[in-house]
């Protein structure tokens, strides 16, 4: 019987570099921050881990098996799968092949745009499931269920409040009546594709966290501080944990601001996990 993991317990990578050096990273259930100078392999570790999780998700490999030198162990140990998301922050133009295959909207021209485009559908599905859950609780006839129904939409309201607070200085507010993500700015409707790179990036991260609906899952991010103002960098981990306390965060970073808000004990240097 399939069993979904709560978090990733460890990541192992054999011979990541020439000379036979190996990676063994024992992870915490909540926040894991990988640090180190340029060229030590932070992004490579994140990318190899994400690729292995993709194999597990597709059923091509099981947790604990080795593929191209990579091993991922899960908690609990008898889990057969894990929910996860991967966010990469480089807002580069989409390649021509990507455009031919993926584009159904001429506004989608960069990697972040493409992530927003995919998230719009996930956000619609999330709202449908949310509505169905509220109806189920309200019609159950149980007073306790009816009280719980009032709490079901709380994460969505928190997400909207977060975005409004982050975007306040530029006069943007999220449109709370729309089924899609869009914004008001000085009385006009603007799409998420019109946001700055930093705004798109923050939107992608927090929207990804929201649609996981406070379930256990792993969120992998490679240098999420890129394009973010230093105040947003400092707030990011706390906002993610507020939206989903069950999310396991695994990220690489160069930025001291990412750990300013009490996350110093969650930092691992690459040389500390190199054998």
Image: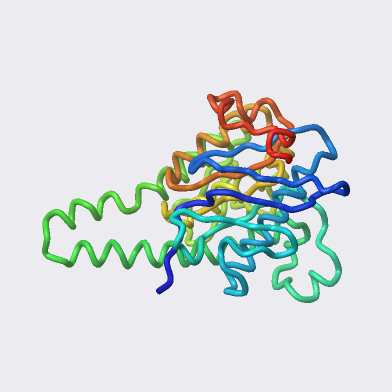
Observer-nearest of 4 and 24: 24
Q: Residue at x 79, y 50 (%)?
A: 16
The reply, left or right, for residue 150 in relation to residue 275 is: left
Please determine whether, in this image, residue 246 is positioned above or below residue 231.
below
Query: In the figure, residue 253 lies in which quadrant?
Result: top right
The reply, left or right, for residue 131 in relation to residue 188 is: left
Please determine whether, in this image, residue 266 is positioned above or below residue 117.
above
Coloration of the structure image: rainbow
Observer-nearest of 70 and 157: 70
- Residue 1: horizontal and vertical position, in percent? 40, 74
The reply, left or right, for residue 217 in relation to residue 58 is: left
Q: Residue at x 57, y 74 (%)?
A: 59
Please determine whether, in this image, residue 45 is positioned above or below residue 37.
below
- Residue 25: horizontal and vertical position, in percent? 63, 43
Q: Residue at x 20, y 62 (%)?
A: 138
Please determine whether, in this image, residue 252 is positioned above or below residue 82.
above
- Residue 167: horizontal and vertical position, in percent? 58, 37
- Residue 212: horizontal and vertical position, in percent? 47, 56
Query: In the figure, residue 185 lies in which quadrant?
Result: top right
Numbered circles on residues, count: 0
- Indicate the quadrant containing the C terminus: top left, top right, bottom left or bottom right: top right
Q: Residue at x 63, y 55 (%)?
A: 86
Observer-nearest of 214 and 77: 77
């Amino acid at each position: 019987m399939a069993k979904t993991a709560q978090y990733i317990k460890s990541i192992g990578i054999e011979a990541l570099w020439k000379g036979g050096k190996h990676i063994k990273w024992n992870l915490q259930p909540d926040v894991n921050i990988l640090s180190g100078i340029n060229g030590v392999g932070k992004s490579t570790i994140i990318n190899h881990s994400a690729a292995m999780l993709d194999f597990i998700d597709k059923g091509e490999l099981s947790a604990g098996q080795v593929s191209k030198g990579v091993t991922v162990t899960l908690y609990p140990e008898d889990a057969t799968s894990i929910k996860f998301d991967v966010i990469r922050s480089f807002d580069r133009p989409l390649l021509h092949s990507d455009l031919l295959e993926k584009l159904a909207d001429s506004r989608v021209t960069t990697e972040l745009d493409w992530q927003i485009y995919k998230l719009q559908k996930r956000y619609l599905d999330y709202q449908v499931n949310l509505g169905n859950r509220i109806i189920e609780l309200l019609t159950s006839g149980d007073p306790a269920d009816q009280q719980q129904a009032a709490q079901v939409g709380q994460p969505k309201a928190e997400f909207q409040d977060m975005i409004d607070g982050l975007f306040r200085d530029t006069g943007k507010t999220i449109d709370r009546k729309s089924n899609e993500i869009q914004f008001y700015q000085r009385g006009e409707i603007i799409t998420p594709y019109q946001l700055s790179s930093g705004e798109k990036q923050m939107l992608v991260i927090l929207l990804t966290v929201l649609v996981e609906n406070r379930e256990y899952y792993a969120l992998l991010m490679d240098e999420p501080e890129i394009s973010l103002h230093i105040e947003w960098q400092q707030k990011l981990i706390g906002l993610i944990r507020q939206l989903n306390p069950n999310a396991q965060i695994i990220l690489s970073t160069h930025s001291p601001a990412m750990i300013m808000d009490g996350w110093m004990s969650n930092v691992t240097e690459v040389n500390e996990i190199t054998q």
